[in-house]
Amino acid sequence: MVELLFLVGLAVAVFVGFNIGGSSTGVAFGPAVGSDTISKTTAAGLMTAFALLGGATVGTEVIETMGGRIVPSDQFTLLASVTVLFFVGLALLVSNLFGVPASTSMTAVGAIAGLGVASGTLDWEVMGRIVSWWLVAPIVAFWLSAVVGRYLYPHLAARIVFETDGPGTSRRERVGQFLVVAIGCYMAFSAGASNVANAVAPLVGSGELALYPGVALAGTAIGLGAFTIARRTLDTVGNDLTELPILAALIVETVSATIISLLSLAGIPASLAVSATMCVVGLGWGRATRTTRLADAAGAAVAGTAAGGSGGTGISVSALNVDAEENPASSGSGEKQSVAKIGEEDPESVTTAADLFDPSATGRVVMLWILTPTISAVASYLVFQYVL
């Protein structure tokens, strides 16, 4: 019976890692594949290698937090470990059914917290620190991306070419190709650092699986997903870059991966999907505000009138899509173009806030981000309190 339960636990861990590889590979290497810089097979290989590297280095801190700091490791009996992993797998199922990137990290922590409350062993200080960062990280992601969008984005767009009609031979084209691959590898590293724990932390905490064999198991499962189901997500992300240009995607990846890598280094399980989404919103908002100078906006606020834009709130995804005159990659020109100063950009390219996101879809996403760890924690508590 014990051996069967352990095999079930391994199967669920592989299932979690497999799905992580399937979804994260497209996010990390979609821009590189979509721009024909690397092949899908190369992307899968890089994803496997860097996810393993992230899990074996920074990710060990997250494994230790989830496997023995939120609740003592002796609470992770084999049955308890499999139960926690079941809730992580359930989060993936919910994510697939609703088409929303539910956070496996937040769901896993919720399940572990439910175990801790039921057993009276939850470390509230550790839990409080984790939840605090869940609130702070998206805010940091938004504002960092907003600053980049407002002050740096058009300058980067004018200097780097990501797509070419032929072999990349110019210096700017080579820089663009290098960046799109390097940032993809960085994103893969971050995904491994934050997500390997979701697959194996309970089993490692129970002592049924040693730390590095656990990392190897999760990394292999991520690689399996990268070489199989990720091919579809690579097509989707790589070929659907009209609303989020390659440069914008790379900025989102860099900012979100940095935030999650730093949190992982501190042993904080956090959601890459949540941070990345707030980066998209922040980058779009920052780009949109380039039509208005801060002094004008402050004066308008005091006077109670609208400043800049075209009468709307000035936040839009189209703000991420720079015009041909500003982006040489879209114009086909090999020469660096001039960049309009803040307050001088064409307000006609900026529409309203409704164009940045679908309010109903965004509401559903936010609701599920809150609900999935909450439901996980409550359900876990009930199971551990009254069933196990």
Image (cartoon, rainbow, N blue to C red):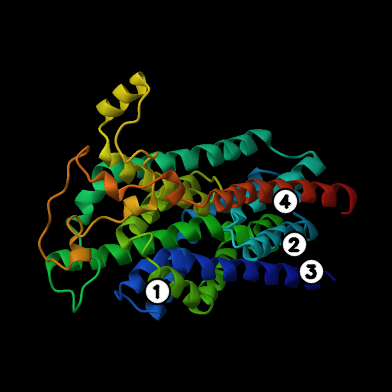
Which residue is under mark 1? Answer: 43
Query: Label 2 belongs to which residue?
Result: 82
Residue 261 visible: no
Which residue ends up furthest to the top in the rendered image?
302
- Name the N-terminal-most of marks 4 and 1: 1
The residues bearing labels 2 and 3 have C-alpha atoms spaced at a distance of: 8 Å
Q: Do the residues under discs 2 and 3 have CB atoms within 8 angstroms?
A: yes
What separation in Å lies between label 4 and label 3 (alpha carbons)? 21 Å
- Label 2 sits on what residue type? Val
Specify whether residue 234 is in view: yes
Three-letter residue code for mark 1: Ala
Could you classify mark 2 by the number of other residues whose Cα lies within 10 Å: few (under 14), some (14-19), or many (20 or more)? many
Q: CA distance from mark 1 to mark 2?
A: 31 Å
Q: How far separated are the C-alphas under marks 3 and 1?
A: 35 Å
Residue, far front? 311
The local crowd at label 4, few if under 14, some if 14 to 19, many if 20 or more residues have their Cα within 10 Å, is many
Kind of residue sitting beneath label 3: Leu
Judged by depth in the image, the label closer to the viewer, 4 or 3, is 4
Residue 53 position, x and y percent, is: 44, 63
Separation (CA) of disc 4 from disc 1: 33 Å
